[in-house]
Amino acid sequence: MLKQFLPRSLFGRSLLILVTPLLLVQAVATFIFYDRVWQTVSRRLAAGVAGDVGMVVGLLADGTQAADISSILQMASTKMGLRVSFRPGESLPKPQPGPPEGILERDLTASLIERVGSPFVLDAWSLSRDVEILVELPYGVLRVLAPRERLFTSTIYIFFLWMAGTSLVVFVIAVLFMRNQIRPIRRLAEAADAFGKGRDGPDFKPAGSTEVRQAAAAFILMRERVRRFLTQRTEMLAGVSHDLRTPLTRMKLELAMLGDGPEVIGLKADVSEMDRMVDSYLAFARGEGGEKPVTTDLGALLADLAAAARRAGHAVGLDTEGDLIVSIRPEAFKRCLDNLIANATRHGTRVTVTAARRSRQIEILVDDDGPGIPAERREEVFKAFVRLDPSRNPSTGGVGLGLTIARDIVRGHGGELTLIDSPDGGLRARIKLPF
Ligand SMILES: Nc1ncnc2c1ncn2[C@@H]1O[C@H](COP(=O)(O)OP(=O)(O)OP(=O)(O)O)[C@@H](O)[C@H]1O
Ligand SMILES: [Mg+2]
């Protein structure tokens, strides 16, 4: 469930690992600050103001002379920073309904109840710079305007600003550094991908952290080893085939001079069979590495192949759908499809080739109505020189390289070749080619 929402890329995941604890720490810090510092400070400030108001109320006790009243009010404004006025004969107004009670009103109300002792009305929202407190006295109403600054600390905003600011800076730095750390990993992945698809990527040098460098160096070593193996195999096979060719040519000449006797005919057939085999070995050894990808109409290519098979006397149906323009190595791909169609016509009587564009890939199917291959042997036949008929009878197969070459070519294009059951009763070869 959770996996769906988590980022997939290494970059996203690293950022998440970094940002989650950062946010958590900030949340805890904010909570503690709010709970412990802000509330306490607010309570103490309210108590201070309430105490001052309480003192003024206490001084203006019953029976104070008018002259004393004005000097008390004067003192309150100069020494306590409160603007106080006295309205003789008035009584308290009804409290106005205002916005919901905030932390300031709550604390101030509590402190005023505790320290003033007379009925009062508090208005904390009507004036922008002051808080108005009206206190009922026996012979009038005392109006106190306390500056908001005395009741309010702006530390909390500065604190939040600093937290958000530093987090943003940390986040930006993390993004920049992380990108640099992830780039070598991405490059390694691209190089491995390119090598796997038979493309030689651009020059690749180990870079980044020790572990990534180590993986990159190991990859380069492995790539060299694989390349060496491939060239050794190719050179050996090419050498053997090439050396066989010379005596074969001589044999063909000698046979030609012998004429057309009955015992010569069989020999001739064998020699031409050997010639064909040597040709396939050479083709396999040469590989298709040299060819460059070209934008090709796969539909036309398949039509050519089907037409060629029909000319050779096979029943081959073709069914293509939509535009099938792709970038492929056409000669190699032709060889691959040719091998699959040759297998199908050799083992079945009716062959159907289907090609269609799926969401992100092209699917090519070669179906036949022959005996098929048992499921447990379908991987085996992809190995070089493997044939299911151990007699190596030329009518049931060739040298056993067709599927090996075909799969090599499809993988070289980044695709996959698999063998499955065909609805026609025989074997279905399925190529999935990304584009
Ligand atoms: N369509 C098929 N139906 C049944 N068996 C098949 C089919 N295609 C291949 N096979 C079996 O798989 C084996 C290997 O096929 P592969 O194409 O690699 O070699 P081959 O056809 O014997 O020789 P080559 O293609 O090199 O001339 C074949 O010998 C055959 O036994
Ligand atoms: Mg074959």
Image (tube, helix red, strand yellow):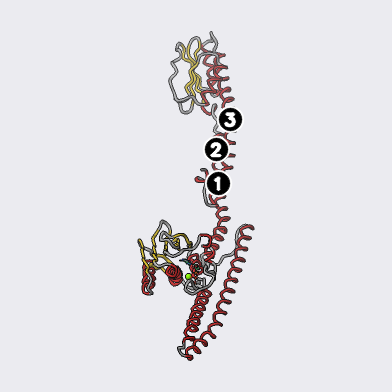
The three-letter amino acid code for the residue at tag 3 is Asp
Q: Position of residue 51 (x, y in %)?
A: 58, 19
What is the crowding at mark 3: few (fewer than 14 residues within 10 Å), some, or many (at least 20)?
few
The three-letter amino acid code for the residue at tag 2 is Phe
| Among numbered discs 2 and 3, the one appearing first in the sequence | 3
Q: Residue at x 57, y 28 (%)?
A: 39
Residue 169, visible in the rendered structure? no
Q: Secondary structure at mark 3?
A: helix
**Vertical side of 271 occupied by 41: above or below:** above
| The C terminus: image quadrant | bottom left
Q: Based on the displayed image, in which of its 4 quarters is residue 89 positioned?
A: top left
Image depth: mark 2 or mark 3 in front: 3
Residue labelled with disc 1: 16
| Among numbered discs 1 and 2, the one appearing first in the sequence | 1
Q: Secondary structure at mark 2?
A: helix
User: Looking at the image, which is closer to me, 288 or 80?
Assistant: 288
Residue labelled with disc 2: 160
Q: Position of residue 378 (x, y in %)?
A: 51, 62
User: Looking at the image, which is closer to me, 154 or 358?
Assistant: 358
Residue 34, visible in the rendered structure? yes
Q: Secondary structure at mark 1?
A: helix
Residue 367 — which label? none
